[in-house]
Image (cartoon, rainbow, N blue to C red):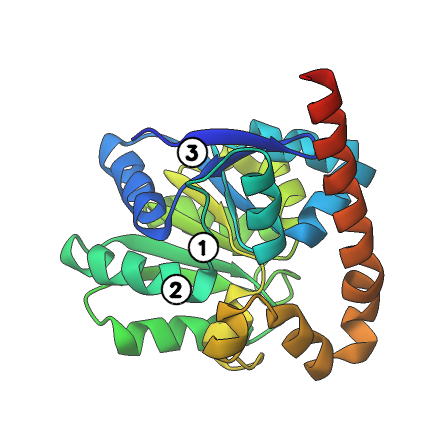
Amino acid sequence: MACQPVEIMGVRVMAIDQHGLVEQVLAWVKEGAQRTVTYVNAHCLNLAVENSTYRQQLNNADLVYVDGIGAVWAGRMHGARGIHKVTGRNWITELCQKGEKDHLRMYLLGGAPGVSDQACQELTQRYPQLSIGGCADGYFQVKSEEQVLAEINANHIEVLLIGMGAPTQENWVTANRPYIQANVCWCVGALFDYLAGVEKPVPKWLERVGLEWAWRLKENPKGKWKRYCVGIPRFIGRVTWQWLTHRRTHA
């Protein structure tokens, strides 16, 4: 399944929509392939500029999609007209609806203790034909890392969702991918918090106009002020500089 790549701040990103993303993941499952999927937004791209290890992990992934309006804007500035924002709370619905038909085997790893359990219960109630092969928190307090890896492989997991936040989740996948038999390792950020009701969903109208960051800042000013009040201007400056440099080089 072809998708158009574009480089944003040193990271190769795929211009793909939600349907294409889900179809690609399910195609890899059917092929029996082993792949890694992750995402970027403005915060992730700022981290990638400052952290070369994380940047390399993103570029080593098989598919990096966009989950943030800032990254969409940056991609379109660099000519990727088909780039779309793809959010976890939307693609999880399509993935599970399609996965029910084939009894897709999934595992949820990440979040604070109890969060992945709640997220697992929510998905099981919504999609009873989905096969959830287990869950564990991202601190390995209830189950050790060795127990989690053994459970994933024993249950023949096809899609492993890892929600630890960037770059912790990418670090974990890089260190453990050789020991994981799951077809697709998919880094999903705070998805489990939304499924479990820990984080309130952004109102749809704010999401449509690209102001979801303002909602998150309002909900958690202490934890998010630096990411948005410092990070957004820094991101705009970096993207603009890359665009101007590209224009001068290709003039």
Mark 3 in CB contact with mark 1 (< 8 angstroms): no
Q: Tell me the quarter of the picture where residue 54 sits.
A: top right
Residue 129 position in % (x across, y down) = 19, 66
Q: Nearer the viewer, residue 48 or 16?
A: 16
Q: Earlier in the sequence, mark 3 or mark 1?
A: 3
Residue 192 position in % (x across, y down) = 51, 68
**Side (left or right) of 35 relative to 148:** left
Q: Residue at x 53, y 44 (%)?
A: 38
Mark 1 in CB contact with mark 2 (< 8 angstroms): yes
Q: Tell me the quarter of the picture where residue 138 sits.
A: bottom right
| Residue 86's disc number | 1
| Residue 218's disc number | none
Which residue is most to the front? 251
The residue pinned by badge 2 equals 90
Residue 178 visible: no
The residue pinned by badge 3 equals 35
What element does badge 1 sit on?
A: loop
Q: Residue at x 43, y 30 (%)?
A: 4
Residue 215 position in % (x across, y down) = 64, 78
Residue 242 position in % (x across, y down) = 74, 32
